[in-house]
Amino acid sequence: MRTDTQQIVRLEDYRPSDFLIDRVELDVGLHPTATRVVATLTMRPNPEGRPDAPLVLDGDELNLKALALNGRSLSAEEFEASPQSLTIAQAPRQPFTLTIETEINPTANTKLMGLYRSGGNYCTQCEAEGFRRITYFLDRPDVMAVYTTRIEADREDAPVLLGNGNPVAGGVVDGSDRHYAVWHDPHPKPSYLFALVGGRLGRVSKTFTTMSGRAVDLAIYVEPGKESRADYALDALERSMRWDERVFGREYDLDVFNIVAVSDFNMGAMENKGLNIFNDKYVLASPETATDMDYAHIEAIIAHEYFHNWTGNRVTCRDWFQLCLKEGLTVFRDQEFSSDERSRPVHRIAEVKTLRARQFLEDASPLAHPVRPTQYREINNFYTATVYEKGAEIVRMLRTIIGEADFRRGMDLYFERCDGTAATVEDFLSAFAEVTGRDLSHFARWYEQSGTPRVTVKGHHDPDAKTFRLDFTQSTPPTPGQPEKGAMAIPVALGLVAQDGSDQDGSDQDDSAQDRSWANAACERLDSRGVFLFDKPQDSITFTGVTSRPVPSLLRGFSAPVKLSLDLPNEELLALLRHDTDAFNRWQAAQTVAMRLLVGLAKGVDAADQDIGALSGALCSFMGRDALADPAFAALVVTLPSEADVAQEIGQDVDPDAIHRARSQMRQRIGRSCAQPLQRFYDALSDSGPYSPDAASAGRRSLRNACLDLLAAADAGTGEALAVRQLESASNMTDRLASLSVLTTLPGAVREEAIARFGDRYRNEPLVLDKWFTLQAAIPEDGTLERVTGLMQHPAFSISNPNRVRALIGSFAMLNQVQFNRADGAGYRFLASIVLRVDELNPQLAARLLTAFSTWRMMESARRAQAEQALRSIAQKPNLSRDVGDIVSRSLEEGGAK
Ligand SMILES: [Zn+2]
């Protein structure tokens, strides 16, 4: 393992660049194997830099062809060049021009960083450090320059040529088959936001008029013939632009906004200035090929990348430690957009499910790190759920604490003050501190301290004094590099709910009375929005005027990313499911009860028969009463915590087989006792009319498919018959995939035939085949590993395409708890061998796959030993990439990095 030679980059070592680049003129002659890049950099020493520093430019696998300073070619003694860097020891102390010519091979670029080819087109990915694979550069986000890019290419090969900014010139290169386009971006930007595209692409477009009346040409480029599948994305873009004007007062700032969909992409999408590049799975959609979930993701990711234009591009990050400054904030913005466009409680529940499944898991793993890390070996490994999702939760908590009006004022000040700069978390927080006059230094600990805080609450009712006291304690477990933790500033949104939902004085027996009943209850520690700021290790709050024992509804809307432990009996939780005004906590109450029962069953400590009966009774009556009011919400309520959620809750000596059995058993019980309402809703919500991806229609489909899933769990014969009928008659991918998914849980010839027919039907649709790969990889049966290795031979599978690899191998490792964590270790050995193979092609992708091992320490001892062995087999390989070397060494480190 080469970790000892891996350089660690530390936040505390930050210093300004010794040189600055004001202008970049790029001339890129596209060629499949020998692309020539001539970069002319207008530079000067940075007054804040070291006066005698040499000029050191970053490179990565570069091949220098020529170098000139102020127009004069430099002799070999005047510089030092390697594929990784270019150094000029005696750099001028005055402004100067550096002209660098490099040659690169986009066809051989399998890392998908820098300039590469996808489906015969040329495209780029420069975040975090890909620009240095195009030319030597000061490749750091605080070096911001104005770019002009001339792109030249074969007219046949690449009729479309796109760059950042606005198009300013173009034409045919005289006497040749080549043509060119010149793009100019007037906004200074860091190199990670650079992009260019050349290729044969279809286009959809429309004109958008901004709030100040400027016309902007919006266009989405896709594989020719798939133009109509970009319509939804284009619509989502327009809605995002309007929303950002309305909610944040942010207007778009160029004449064009282009999006290009490519099929080989390491991430979801990239916010390059004026030229977003997308993984095509987040652009292309038709009812025949995309599910409701796909439509929702497209909407969210289109919005996310667009919102970066202000949070990321106009205000960028000073250094990569501040990644959450752009990502956490932009995730928060896209979540708010989706909540406004869809059902807010349903969206909030989905966000929290993701947060717990990915970020809480990361916090409990050897890969735990603060939202703003203090060190890294490989920055690509910090595009994590912690930076993104927990980063968004911090912004949400900030808004909860200071209120919406002050939040908006703080955002305005942040934009005003930091526009055109490379900023820090401190710059961000200081804007809010200033508009509110609050000291946010304690709150800032959320950026520094890793781990998920645990909040324990106990309630005490005094009927004589008519008081209700809540005692809070908090602690955060140790994480790598952070053995000791301080108390966090935790906003707890809360209310009290009557046990029976009735009013306190008994005058209102209506179920909907909910916490109106506590109109007389008062607590001076709550702010006007019902939020208690819990910022000490222990604290208590007391309500007065509480005549009967209430049920506390805590952490409403999931007001902080913490684990809450509240010792309420199941029947009180089920009262919350029935009566709470907070939809999130209604859902949470059912989940908490289900989780208790699942953990008990999995540990074999409690047969819990009566309790399961009580839960299914509550779910049945919930369905009968409330399901049609918000079907999407109902679908979430009747869906049990996942096997991975249960494993995380148990936390140590996990036996995935026991969890799988427990969950199957509970699904069966609930499916049986609720069979009548489930069947009724399944029939009542049947597919009718043309498909529409809107949230209400999607909600009806999600409830119907949740019913199907439970009906199949209750009775395999019924389930199979319903699923087969739905698979044959479905008018859209959502229903078709849901029925196939149910069939995959029912072994036998019917399933195998359905799988084969689906694969055949969509053999020319890579994005649909990804779903097909995923379903099969997730089958929790012994034969699945063989199935997966067999599918790697499928003509549509390619080890070099990230979407295919994630769909088949990533799904096996991340979604299939029982088979990845096989007791014989075969799942672990399989993943280890794939990681090593992928690492030779695409280290970023390999490192992502490897994070599936992050749960290894919570497994029971036999599995733990198998997983450790597999990890060590990776660690001992020579020539690991820095990406994989970093993850494997952190995964194995005892107690974590210092
Ligand atoms: Zn982003």
Image: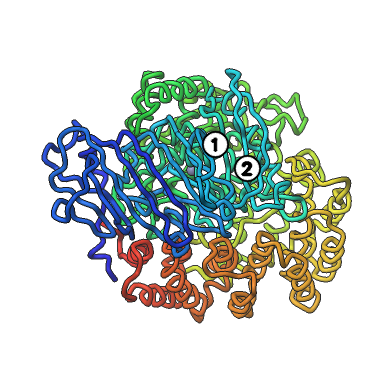
User: Type of residue at label 2?
Assistant: Ile
- Residue appearing at x 37%, y 39% in the figure: 25
Q: The C terminus is located in which quarter?
A: bottom left
Name the residue that disc number 1 marks: 306
- Mark 2 neighbour class, 10 Å CA radius: few under 14, some 14 to 19, many 20 or more: many
> Which label belongs to residue 751?
none
Is residue 323 found left or right of 497 in the rendered image? left
Mark nearer the viewer, 2 or 1: 2
- Local packing at callout 1 (Cα closer than 10 Å; few below 14, some 14-19, many 20+) is many
Which residue is rendered at x = 66% and y = 30% of the image?
207
Quarter-of-image position of residue 82: bottom left
Work out whether mark 2 precedes mark 1 in sequence or the reverse, and give the earlier one.
2
Closest to the observer: 162 or 324?
A: 162
Measure the alpha-carbon separation of dots 2 and 1. 13 Å
Frontmost residue, 736 versus 828: 736
Q: Which residue is at the far front?
A: 175
Q: Which residue is mark 2?
A: 220
Image vertical order of residue 224 relative to residue 188, above or below? below
x, y (%) of residue 621?
Answer: 79, 47
Residue at 41% from the left image edge and 37% from the top image edge? 148
* In the depicted structure, whether residue 876 falls above or below residue 110: below
**Is residue 868 in sight in this rendering?**
yes
Apparent side of residue 36 relative to residue 785 in the rendered image (left or right): left
In the picture, the quarter occupied by the N terminus is bottom left
Height in image: 143 above or below 719?
above
Q: Residue furthest left?
A: 52
Identity of the amino acid at label 1?
Answer: Tyr
Q: Secondary structure at mark 1?
A: helix
Q: Secondary structure at mark 2?
A: strand
